[in-house]
Image (cartoon, grey):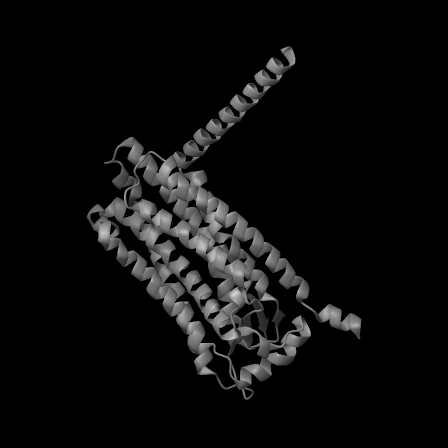
Amino acid sequence: MDNENNSDSFSYYVTFAQRVAQFGFFATTTSCTVLILLTIYGVKRDFGSYKNLLLMFAGLGIVFATTEVLLFPNLHSYNAGYFFYSMERPFRLDTKNVSRFLVIYTGLYGSTICLLSVQFVYRYWAVFSESKLKFFKGWRFIFCIMYCAAFGADWGLSIYYFDEMDAYADHYFRAEMHKRYRLNISEVACFSLVAYNFDNTPRWRNILCTISLFCIMLIQYTIIIYCATIMYLKMEEKLKLLSVSIRNLHRQFYKTLVIQIFTPTICLFSPLIFIIFHPLFNVEIVVPTGMLLCAITIYPAVDAIIIMYVVTDYRNAIKKNFKKVQQKLLSQRGMSTILIRTTQSV
């Protein structure tokens, strides 16, 4: 009996996901902090108002990773539903407040997706309609913040209101969560979605959450694909009118954004598409989808590394600072050698 219970347990996956979250926190805070410092102090070229977007994205990545490591959120997909929860109690909060913390976490995820589409809009306007970049300057930059915050709030509130636990969801998941994780769902902060009732009629309140999240993703992804496609088809013609250095910078940022299409598709969109849509098919499935959250965890770090690798100004700044540190260490080593020899001669 014990062997059967052990074979049914998914506790190992929870431990693994927590280790990845810890790694993601370290990688994100390190890479995003380096990106912030280089953007403010290391890179000599003026990126204009795009600098604000880079700083905002890096800052949001750090906040997202910090929230993740505080909560260690986990997800379990079971037949026509999923169960989203956290066993942690950061700052000794009760389950009700931890649930609100989970809502903030999901809202940060939604804001991250939106900020990515805003970056594509900026690069698109920088090439084809430079006058519109005024919306990214000065006090108008608040519109970018409000755009991301509004969709992030929509994302979080959709989880909060449409995925709230009820008696049917409690009955649906209680035995399964105890079997897989030895978890009493009454004692943890949680949200859940069950797409169908026992008689296979749709549970529209839960399904509205899927519709809401999908609409947000569809809007952002449509913006990303549209801007990327038009820039690919028409950018070279526009860049001929610019200086060589500005032309190269635009190409580098475009290359960065193209890579940023594939990275969030793998890390952000694909895992979530599976998680929110599989309940609609109402097939027998048992998957520890908390593992898929691992991809989301490391995304901010990957994104920061992409920017610093592709954009020449960042690479040069990193090399320059590395050489300074290297020279300083060699100088200190040389001074230590001289002091030792002086002491020995005395």
Q: Tell me where residue 2 sits by quadrant.
A: bottom right
Of 39 and 237, the residue lying toward us: 39
Q: Is residue 271 left or right of residue 127?
A: right
Picture residue at 31% right of the left edge, 50% below the top: 230
Quarter of the rendering occupied by the C terminus: top right
Picture residue at 53% right of the left edge, 61% below the top: 70
The image position of residue 64, as x and y in percent, is: 46, 57
Q: Is residue 174 above or below residue 216?
A: below
The image position of residue 6, as x and y in percent, is: 74, 69
Q: In this view, does 336 lie above or below 148?
A: above
Q: Residue furthest front?
A: 346
Number of marks in the rendered image: 0
The image position of residue 233, as x and y in percent, is: 32, 46
Q: Which residue lies furthest to the top in this view?
A: 345
Q: Which residue lies furthest to the bottom in this view?
A: 199
The image position of residue 73, as x and y in percent, is: 54, 65
Q: In this view, does 233 lie above or below 330?
A: below
Picture residue at 32% right of the left edge, 45% below the top: 51
Residue 233 visible? The answer is: no
Of 81 and 44, the residue lying toward us: 44
Residue 81 visible? The answer is: yes
Quarter of the rendering occupied by the N terminus: bottom right
Q: Residue furthest left?
A: 131
Of 56 and 315, the residue lying toward us: 56
